[in-house]
Amino acid sequence: MVNQKKLQKWVVLGTGGTIAGTAASPSDLTAYQAGQLGVAVLLDAVPGLREVLQDDPLVCEQVAQLDSKDMDPATWQALALRCAHWLAQPDVGGVVITHGTDTLEETAWWLHKVLDTTKPVVLTCAMRPATAALPDGPQNLRDALTVVREPKARGVLVVCAGHIHSARHVQKVHPFRLDAFGSGEAGPCGQVVSGQVRWQAPLDGPQVHPQAGQLLACAAADWPWVEVLHSHAGADPRKVSLLAAAGVRGLVVAGTGNGTVHQLLLAAVLQAQAQGVAVRLSTRCSEGPLVGTPAALQMTEPGLNPFKARISLMLDLMA
Ligand code: ASP
């Protein structure tokens, strides 16, 4: 009897970004337009795609076409719903998402908190537009497809420049280097070397927020308004009262160092908190969690940067 391999379906969702960007000339690596090419075109450019897929079927879908600096709640909602749709199909093994690098870490955290699945969701990106003489997108997309098919892969992961990062730790750390992402002190959770995955750290299981369903069911325009405020020399406390008067529901304070906050800003934030604005404390430092109880404010989950903390607070406020 012939031993027939069980075929699994893989899904690639396009959202735009530099990976789908085009420039007037192959030497132009910065003056380009993100989000121009469709996801099917990006897949056509992946070297050895058939070899990676080993005859498995691939489905692709364009969920959005934007520069991820302009990412918005409606797109996040649509993306999460399309992921949930595909992941619920028994024959689908996992989802790859092509995305811009600028807010990739936020989308990764958003999906990590709202998708109730153990199947892998792998986000990938590029630092050079698709029209570059040597674009990095095709290799990154190939690596992402390799990772999503890896039996141990699970949860939301980010693949860029041969590194695999977790949604919790990943952060864009460089404005133009091809290897633009880091995972701070935690380090990447793996690497893709010559088409093989090498895991270096255990992967996070699903951590769905209890309010995820409510947020996904609610019109994106009605999601709680949460802002990030940085503490810095000369921080002006009027920004807090202006936001509170305008109806902000939550504030994430990106403190200096170990969550210290300029005294004038802290007084204004405490006043807003007393008036019902929800506040969480994170840090401007790009590495390391807050330790101890540095200020009279509730700390965010350990290790979350202010922008991921904003997403978690938005979910908390749906309660
Ligand atoms: N601005 C682009 C974006 O985030 C940058 C990139 O993808 O590298 O879509």
Image (cartoon, rainbow, N blue to C red):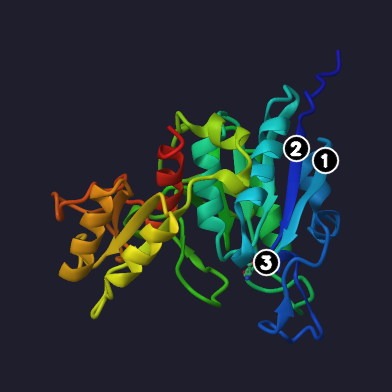
Q: Which one is in front, 70 or 37?
A: 70
Within 10 Å of disc 2 (Cα), the crowding (few <14, some 14-19, many 20+) is many
User: Disc 1 marks which residue?
Assistant: 59
Label of residue 10 in the image: 2
Quick one: label 3 or label 2, which is nearer the N terminus?
Answer: 2
Mark in the foreground, 3 or 2: 3
Query: Which circle, 1 or 3, is nearer the viewer?
Result: 3
Q: Are marks 1 and 3 in contact (CB under 8 Å)?
A: no
Quick check: 79 left or right of 190?
Answer: right
Mark 3 Cβ and ligand 1 under 8 Å apart: yes
The percent position of residue 275, horizontal first and vertical second, equals 28, 49
Few, some or many C-alpha atoms within 10 Å of disc 1 (few <14, some 14-19, many ≥20)? few
Q: Amino acid at mark 3?
A: Asp
* Disc 3 from disc 2: Cα separation: 25 Å
Q: Which residue does the image show at 20% across and 62% down from the upper left?
A: 266
Residue 215 lies, with reference to residue 313, above or below; the image says above
Q: Residue 64, position in %: x, y? A: 75, 54
- Residues at marks 1 and 2 touching, judged by CB atoms closer than 8 Å: yes
